[in-house]
Image (cartoon, rainbow, N blue to C red):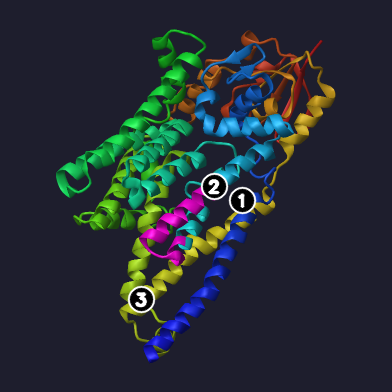
Amino acid sequence: MATMQATVSTTRTSSVVRPILIGLVVLVSLFLLLYHLSDFPRPWYDEGSHLHVAKNFALNGVYADSSSEGYRPFGPAIGVGPTVMLPVAALFRAFGVSIPLARLVIVVYSILTLLTLYVMMMRFVSWPYGLLAVILLLMVPAIGYLYYSRTVVGEIPGTFFFLLGLALWLHPRGRTIAGLVGVGVLIGLSTITKNQFAFFLLPALLLCWVADLVWYKQRGWKYFVIPGVISGLMFGLWLYIVVIKLGQGGDFASNLKTLQTAGMGAFIVIDKDSIPRAVSLLTGIGVYGALFIPSFLYGIITSLKRSEQGQDRGIIAIFLIVSTALFCASLAWDRYAFGPVVLVVVFVVLLIRDLVGIANIKPASWWKTIRQGDATPSVVIGVFLIGWFSVAVLIPLYNRVHDISSQTNGDAYAVANWVKANVPQDAVIETWEQEMGVLTNNKIHYPPQLVLAYAVAQEWQHGPSAANYYDFRTESTADYIIKGPFGVFTGLYPDDRLSNYDIINTIGAYQIYKKRS
């Protein structure tokens, strides 16, 4: 009878606590994702370049980047896939061009990503640990999940399609032919949304099949081949469209070479500086309170069991291993760490769950033990978990709220308003601040896409200045120059090249120059 009463009491408590906690997480998440959405982060280079494509498609029906001389192949047209560009373009066409409106698309993708993670973790553990996974990913500082949920880039949408495909694959319904086709389509959508994802997703699919053949011997070839072939074909078709169709009819070999130079220079790089950066990011406190390595090892060890659960964990572990290896072979930018950092949260939560189980923490008895001053295993693990939660959740939560409350910046909008009011429509503006092309309809000339590869090499690989490869005086007949944060950062407009221009206005970090008559 006592046991039955305790069970009923626990059920009643859960029925009250669960909606309260879920509601609290939902409210906090919506606040973090939506508050000051227009001004944090400030509109910036990558976001502006992607939105050029959506704007061109919405207004002109052309899926391409543009500059004053016309449309440009490659570049931002392939940096983020049509799964982002087309919804944004549809909103632009229906409601007008707006950066906050475009950011809402990414916010929706982020909410769907967190919901998918919650449902997947519910299957592995239980709803409280599903909420923990959501909170950890939303707050993780190392890859700026929240930051990239509020700006138009491809990491969040790509992560959504991958996680949804993975969740379906590991679900019993994912073993039907229809389910496996769905898995392949979702993973394929992930690769075309953010093409860098293809470089760990497709090899990992193959390795999962190899692991089944050699070790698990449970699920058969269809389980791996159908998703692998479909996702591979989708990525291959997208690559063809990128190289031939978006390459504006150029020679395949030359287009492919240009694509590799412009898009892959930062992704496959192994040097003495990049690997330490990668290791520092993954092992730092910014990845779930420095639990990446313990959780990485825990995931591998617990995936060795030849069982359904063991193979489920093994599939996630293989994706984790491949994405980690690829990240360590890149320039180690935070955006390249999305794969390993998102995947490892599964094992972080499972590790925490097992630590809680080992400690057998019961608040009443635990507090009594503390008062007695006994350093029992339960107390030691409990204290560790409280400290870890503070470092992994509470401090990042405070920092994220502080960021979006105090680091708003509307300078780009102010500059755009000044340009629209003071610069003639037929005047050419030279700038590398891509957001200007979204916020205004003026005639703007941008440096070629290849210059970005030189700027990356300059900043991260000690290469020569990007200004050595580009001189706006020979590339355009600029009447005005806007030198903003990105132009200053890359040094693309040195003062000696501005001798024929006068500063006529300064707005925040933006300087506006006009050519002397």
- Residue at screen point 62% across, 57% down: 401
Q: Position of residue 240 (x, y in %)?
A: 42, 19
Disc 2 packing (10 Å; few <14; some 14–19; many ≥20): many
Q: Position of residue 280 (x, y in %)?
A: 39, 47
Residue 122 is inside the magenta segment: yes
Q: Position of residue 445 (x, y in %)?
A: 66, 17
Mark found first going from the N terminus, 2 or 1: 1
Q: What residue is shown with label 1? A: 33
Q: Secondary structure at mark 2?
A: helix
Mark found first going from the N terminus, 1 or 3: 1
Q: Amino acid at mark 1?
A: Leu
Q: Position of residue 456 (x, y in %)?
A: 48, 28
- Quick check: 174 left or right of 439? left
Verify CB contact (< 8 Å) between mark 2 and mark 1: yes
| Residue depth check, mark 1 versus mark 3: number of the one nearer the observer | 1
Of residues 509 and 180, which is closer to you in this image?
Answer: 180
- Quick check: 135 left or right of 410? left
Mark found first going from the N terminus, 2 or 3: 2
| Residue depth check, mark 2 versus mark 3: number of the one nearer the observer | 2
Q: Amino acid at mark 3?
A: Val
Dominant secondary structure, magenta: helix
Q: Amino acid at mark 2?
A: Ser
Q: Which mark is residue 380?
A: 3
Residue extent of the magenta highlight: 110-130
Q: What residue is shown with label 2? A: 110
